Image (spheres, rainbow, N blue to C red):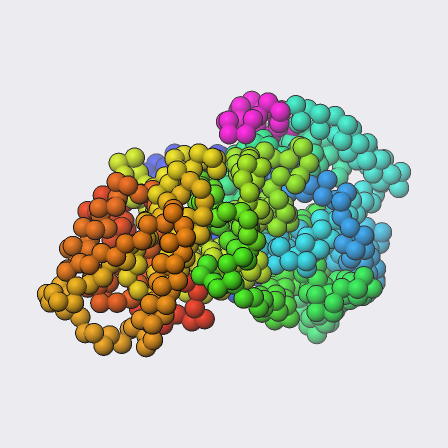
Amino acid sequence: MASNGTAKCPPPMKAASNGVFQGDNPLHFALPLLIVQICLVVVLTRVLAYILRPLRQPRVIAEIIGGVLLGPSALGRNHKYLQAIFPARSLTVLDTLANLGLLFFLFLVGLELDPKSLRQTGKKALSIALAGISLPFALGVGTSIVLRATISKGVNEGPFLVFMGVALSITAFPVLARILAELKLLTTDVGRMAMSAAAVNDVAAWILLALAIALSGVGRSPLVSLWVFLCGFGFITSCIFIAPPIFKWIARRCPQGEPVDEIYICATLAAVLAAGFVTDTIGIHALFGAFVMGVLVPKEGAFAGALVEKVEDLVSGLFLPLYFVSSGLKTDVATIQGAESWGLLALVIFTACFGKIVGTVLVSLLCKVPFKEALTLGFLMNTKGLVELIVLNIGRDRGVLNDQTFAIMVLMALFTTFLTTPIVMAIYKPAQMAKFEYKYRTIQRKEANTQIRMLACFHSTRNIPTLMNLIEASRGTGKKGGLRVYAMHLMELSERSSAILMVHKARKNGLPFWNKSNTSDSNQIVVAFEAFHHLSQVSIRPTTAISPMSSMHEDICTSADSKRAAIIILPFHKHQRFDGHLETTRADFRHVNRKVLEHSPCSVGILVDRGLGGNSHVSASNVNYTVTAFFFGGHDDREAFSYGALMAEHNGIRLNAVRLILDRKVVGDSVRVDINDENVPEGLADEDFSFLEEFKEKVSEDGSIEYEEVVVSDVAEAVGVVQGFNNRCNLFLVGRMPEGQLVAAIGRKSECPELGPVGNLLISPEMKITASVLVVQQYRSSLTGDSLASLKDGDTTDEDGD
C-alpha cells in the first residue's frame, strides 16, 4: 500500500527527450508522448468513421467509440499498454490540451447559433423544444432517485438531480444538423422544425448546466452557489452589452472578398480565452465564456467565416478527439456488473428515449403535425453528442457522478445517437413520400405558350457569368408563360464542423437570395443574382443542395422533380485554362453529372463553359450571339433543336440549325454501318421527319433561324462542316446521344462518354473549338442502349492538359 501511495506523486515529465541514441525513451517525455497519443486517436477515430460511413452515422459516434476503446473498457485492460501510452502523469497535459481544444470548439458551436433565428422561432418549434426539455428533465430527476438508492449512494442530492435531468434533456444541435444533412432533411418542414427546436434546446441546456455547476460546490454554504449563479448571470449580461458593438466594428472593417487582418483574429481568440478565464474563476467552467463569445460574434460578413477557417481544422481535427479519449479513459464498462447495473442501464436508456420521444410527439400532435412527422421529430430530438459528454465529464470531475453512473450515461448517449439515423430512415422517407406528377419534362412540347422551368446548378462563382448569360439566352420572348429559373448552389457536406454553418443557408431554401435583412451577407453570388433578377425578365429563385458528393445527384433530381423543371443545367467537370485547354476542376463533379443524367426526372444539359458572353452578365439589349445546333437524328437532337428555337426568340440571338445527312451513294469503310441498326428504334425516322417538317415551318416564319441541310460523304467531311462553324459561333448546341449511321461512324472511343460522340468531338483539342458547348439529353422514362451504357463506362484518367 505504501508503494501505491508514493506512486500517486510521480516526478513531473520533462517536455522533450534527448533522443534514443542518448538512452532516452521518448514515451517518458511529455511532447513525444502527446504526439503519439494524438496520432493514435486521430487514426483510430478516422478508421472508425470510415467503417461507420455506410450506416450514415455522424463522426461523433466514431469519436465516442474510439475514446471508449482506447480506455480501460477495451485496450486499457492491457496495463502495459495503458502505462506506456496513457500513463497517469501524462493525463494532466492530455486533459489540458483536450479542454483547450474543447474551449475553441465550443466557440465554434456558439458561432453556429444565431440569436436572431432564436428570436424568430415559431410557437410550434418553441413548444416542441420546451416539451423536449421538460418531460426528459422530470424523468431524469426520477431516475436519479433510483440511482441514488442503488449505485450512487452518498452523492450530493441537489446537484445529482439537476445533472441527471440535464443529461437526459439535451439535444445535440451540431450532431442533429449533420444527421439531417446526411438524410436530406435539412430543407424539409421536419428538418427546419427540428433545427429550430434543437437551437432553443441547446441554449436551455447550457443555462441548466450552469445551474447544475453552481449547485455542485462541495462543502460550501448555499450562498456560494447563489453567488456563482449571480456572477455568471452578471458576466453574460456584461458581454451582451460590451462585446457585440466591438465585434460589429471589426466586422465592418472586414469587407467581403478581402483578407481579414490578423490582429482582429488574434484579438478575438484572446477574448475567447479571457472569457474562459473569467467563467472558470467564477466557478462555472471555462467553456461557458467561449460559448458566449461565439454566440455574440456577428454571423454576417467575412469575419465569422475567417474565424472558422483559422480555428476549425486544427481544433476539430487534432485537439477535439483528445477530449473523447480523455472521456474514454474515465469510462470503464467493466464497472457495469450484475443484473442490477445492466437493469439500471436499460432503465436510463428507456427513460431518455421515452421522455424525449413521447414529450416531443405529444406536443407535435397538439400542434397538428402529422403523426409520422411527429414521430420523426421525436427521434431526431433524442440525438446526443459532445455537449452530453461535457455535462457528464463536468459531473464526474465535480464528484457528482461516480465511475459506474458515468459509464452508464456514456453508453446511453452512444446508444440513443446511434439509433437516430436508421430509425428516421425507416419511418420517414420524404423522397419516396413526395412524388410529383407533371407534364412538361422537356423543352420540346406541343403547347408553345407554357412556362418553362429550369434548374440551373453551379458549384462556385466561376460558373455564374456563363450560367447567367445562358439563362438570358433561354428566356425567349418573355411574352409566353415565361422562364422560371431555380439557381441551385451545390455545396459539399464535408466532415468539417463548419459544414453546419451551411444550415442557415439551407433553411432559406427556395427564397430569393435578396429577400433578407439589410445586414445580410452580401457575397458575390447574392449580388450577381440580385442584379440579374432586376435587369432581366426572368424569375429566379435560388436553392441550395448540401450533400456529400456521393449523393448530391439525389438532391438535384428531387429538387427538379419538386420544382417541376423541364431541364437541368449542370456545369461540366472541367474548366478552361488560359491556354484554351480544358482542365479537370474536380473528378467528383463528373460522378454527379453521370448520376443526374441516369436518374433525372426531366431533360438535362451539360454546359462546357468557354466564356459565353465573357466574364460578366451581358444585358438583354447587348446580347449578340450566334448559336449553332447540329441534327443527326434521335430524341436528344430534337431536344437540342427545340432549345435552339427557344433561344432564337431572343432579339439578339441567331440560330444556325444544321442537319447533317450521309450521302447514301458513297460507301466507305468509315461509314459502312448496318442500316438495320438495332440501336435505332422503329419509327424514329418518322418522328424525326415530322419534327423537321414542323421546324421548317417555324423557320419560314422566324428570320432569326437559318436552316440548312448538308450532305456529307464521310466522317472527315462531317467533322470539317462542324469545325467550319467555330469562327462564327458563340454556343454549340448538340444532342448527347444522336442516332443514325453517320454518328455511329464518328467513333465509339471517347474520353467523356457522358457527353456523347458529338460532344466529345467538340471538346477535343484537335478541333480547337473556342465556343461554349451545351450537350442536351431529352427526358425519357428510362435510358436504354448506348444512352445508358455511356454512363456506365469506367472513368478514364483525366489529363489536365487535354
Q: Residue at x 73, y 65 (%)?
A: 374
Q: Give me the residue at 26% from left, 67% from top.
A: 740
Query: Residue 262: within the magenta?
Result: yes
- Image coords of residue 299 (percent x, y): 64, 36
Residue at left offset 56%, top offset 60% = 564
Left/right of residue 591 with respect to residue 157 in the rendered view: left
Residue sitting at the far front: 700
**In this rendering, does residue 72 appear at all?**
no
Residue nearer the viewer, 491 or 180: 491
Decide whether residue 238 is among the magenta residues.
Answer: no
Residue at the spot x=53%, y=47% of the render?
478
Report the front residue among 682 and 693. 693
Where is residue 137 drawn, in percent x and y? 80, 57
**Can the viewer see residue 474?**
yes
Residue 84, x across and y down, in percent: 47, 50
- Determine which quarter of the picture holds residue 254: top right
Residue 442 spot, x, y in % from top left: 47, 61
The residue lying toward the viewer, choosing from 266 and 745, is: 745
- What range is drawn magenta here? 250-271
Total marks shown come to 0
Q: Is the residue 435 above or below the residue 202 in the image?
A: below
Where 53 sits versus 494, above or below? below
Q: Quadrant of residue 770?
A: top left
